[in-house]
Image (cartoon, coloured by chain):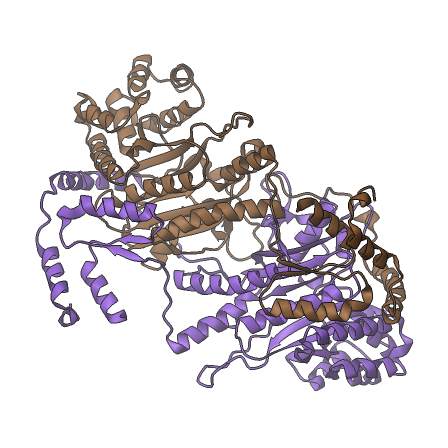
Chain colours: A purple, B brown
Amino acid sequence: MPQLGLLPGRAWTVLLGLLRPPPGALCIRAVRSHSQVAEALIASQLKPHQEKSNFTIKTPKGTRDLSPQQMVVREKILDVVVSCFKRHGAKGLDTPAFELKEILTEKYGEDSGLIYDLKDQGGELLSLRYDLTVPFARYLAMNKVKKMKRYHVGKVWRRESPTIVQGRYREFYQCDFDIAGQFDPMIPDAECLKIMCEILSGLHLGDFLIKVSDRRILDGIFAVCGVPESKFHAICSSVDKLDKISWKDVRHEMVVKKGLAPEVADRIGDYVQCHGGISLVEQMFQDPRLSQNKQALEGLGDLKLLFEYLTLFGVAEKVSFDLSLARGLDYYTGVIYEAVLLQTPVHAEEEPLNMGSVAAGGRYDGLVGMFDPRGHKVPCVGLSIGVERIFSIVEQRIKTFGEKIRTTETQVFVATPQKNFLQERLKLIAELWDAGIKVAIKRENLVAEIQKRLSES
Amino acid sequence: MPQLGLLPGRAWTVLLGLLRPPPGALCIRAVRSHSQVAEALIASQLKPHQEKSNFTIKTPKGTRDLSPQQMVVREKILDVVVSCFKRHGAKGLDTPAFELKEILTEKYGEDSGLIYDLKDQGGELLSLRYDLTVPFARYLAMNKVKKMKRYHVGKVWRRESPTIVQGRYREFYQCDFDIAGQFDPMIPDAECLKIMCEILSGLHLGDFLIKVSDRRILDGIFAVCGVPESKFHAICSSVDKLDKISWKDVRHEMVVKKGLAPEVADRIGDYVQCHGGISLVEQMFQDPRLSQNKQALEGLGDLKLLFEYLTLFGVAEKVSFDLSLARGLDYYTGVIYEAVLLQTPVHAEEEPLNMGSVAAGGRYDGLVGMFDPRGHKVPCVGLSIGVERIFSIVEQRIKTFGEKIRTTETQVFVATPQKNFLQERLKLIAELWDAGIKVAIKRENLVAEIQKRLSES
């Protein structure tokens, strides 16, 4: 006990009390001696450990436990997110962790191989949900809901090669907000971007930027540049890499790997390297080639309106029209967006982290119709907050600054130096519990507790 | 619009505003005409629905979505439960939805067949967690935690034949509270029972009773009555049925189906039909046969101490020593308990529901040691609240009384009768959002909204 010198007079009295043998513990002692007998019996009932430890005790690959410290951080982050969703009038919804396998089939494009399937144990073929969007669309179609603003916080599972250092896991939380139904054009879309701004500001993650584009604009660009329709998907996934590799490398991939004519690639390059605000939208409207494409015009019209609303919402300066934005998922049909942190380390002494996007979403007007027996469509737009990456950033910051996290909310410790006050102590504790006060019983750790409290105060 | 007669003068003005064509909507109209083009294009990209609807859109067997109404009820219930856990100083913990298959093997006895396995897609063999207790024990062993008071609210999965009417699902929430570590005997056990009482009282579910017993007492009874050790398990599972069928039927099963000698069955019957308070514990101490069994004595000693503490906590009258209590799970080693509602319908006009137990738990001193490579044990005791059954009860009550549930927390609606105030409206809404006020945009439903508000006020 090297710290004992720190104890004041009263604490010493407490300590001396602890060192005395507990009086009047006859009954308890009797029970204890039985305990040894029972322990031997229990041990004989359980399998001997030699047989059990031939496998490593761990969590499955790409998953983790959340410790009490991490739970506190997570709850604070989720609180900011959910408060914002509720402020925008969203209702809560929950769906099962798994869906019928067919529900998820052909919704995620190339990523479908990352879906976790359940073993066929007789009965239905099931898969773990891959996101919260497809279950939401299934819910809307199944219950014939034509209009709904809902949020959903829940785990999703993807069999990705986990690079845990970047905050990527095979099991992770998603926080989704979606607006389903027919509304004035682009009003729900603008609200989604406003929500992303509110949450990212509220979490104090430093400066951020939201890139927006529209699936129809990208398709329009491919069309007017002369990409054969059969190569739209492949070229789109090349464009998607522009946030990680240079245009030179992307162009090389398009021409050498995907067999695109060099002049077509160059034409694409002229477009996808552009980014800017509302003025870029205007510029694209005047573009002699793009203005001939109906799809692109449609997308540009929507973006123009979107920027008007974003200006009214006071967030237009956080949003950039970025023609390189592609987004992976198949189900997007209109506006798409993705938020990136501009300078992850808020303070110079922190290690910089490449966090990629921390929130993303878009419009998916065809998904609900895919589940409806008559193909009735419900237009939808939504966003997903990548809380796992945000956890990593906040955790790292806490580590860097050595911040202390309280994992319990205890208000009162009830402790006595001697065991023979046990009855009084238990009565008092029960009274406090019944009055709604957060109490903890302390007996064996009293000295350590006193030291801890003293060092904290 | 049959309700229009209810509208006051001002509302009529609003309505007339709505009937006028929206002015200055040139840009929006342009976009709309594009929308029709885009819709056709999108439709051609998606698979035609004829091919999709050859399967039913549903949730997997034994699972369900939680609607916004149900989410509100669930959140209120979980709030009572988690507040109590925190009041007792518990820290939060989260574990993955699935574990390595081997972690769950040989922990659940006969119920192991109900575990959901994941498909072998290369890599580790995984299973969905069956409860929150085994993952907790795995966490303690893996992180060499010797002492911890934790709560965990999460979904678990069991491939049971679902009888949904009784609130039994294949996916359901558990709310667990556990105390791991060496403490003064029976103090943590008494705290668990106190917590069950606080939660069941706090949820206003009507009167309840907690049955307690001890695995060692039941084993002791079997031993002194002359049950061959090979039949302990089979006879235990017969005893377990005493809350559903009569002693006569249980006896019949023991003798006819399980080949027990009739006089042995009768001896068991003398014991397992007993229930009472502390006096029954004393009576069993004096029992000429049972007092010869070391295991049983150990269990009785612990129960005696438990009742003393329950008296100090003011909850002894809610607890009954019930010799018929068996509990299914293999890992229990000492005290076991189960809470039952005594009169589910609080009011006579409600349909009576047989809800079975709504909370249960016990001591499992051997489980952590099964995961530790050196077999180091960490004694544990805990409880699980069966919130799913509690949901059913509360839902039924709400239905019976026609209670209204608010699924959003909106404080302000911003609405104008005419579209040309859109800019002002959006600016105002953004200001309110930024001030933390819960606002909803209302335009297209204005008349319906006014009617709704009028009828509610």
Depth check, front residue: A311 or A443 = A311
Which residue is at 21% across, 25% downward?
Answer: B284
Depth check, front residue: B173 or A103 = B173
Which residue is at 13% across, 59% downward?
Answer: A14
Q: Is residue B162 left or right of residue A413?
A: right
Q: How many marks?
A: 0
Q: Is residue A221 left or right of residue A212?
A: right
Outermost residue to the front: B9
Q: Which image quarter holds the N terminus of chain A? A: bottom left
Q: Is residue B83 left or right of residue B411?
A: left
Can the viewer see residue B363 in this picture?
Answer: no
Can the viewer see residue B289 in this picture?
Answer: yes
Q: Is residue B23 left or right of residue A202?
A: right
Q: Percent x, y for residue B439? A: 65, 61
Depth check, front residue: B164 or A313 = A313
Which residue is at 67% across, 84% downward?
Answer: A246
A256 shown above or below B386: below
A446 shown above or below B85: below
B361 shown above or below B92: above
Q: Which image quarter holds the C terminus of chain A? A: bottom left
Depth check, front residue: A177 or A214 = A177
* Image-quadrant location for residue A327: bottom right
Q: Percent x, y for residue A108? A: 70, 60
Q: Percent x, y for residue A375? A: 82, 49
Q: Percent x, y for residue B338? A: 38, 34
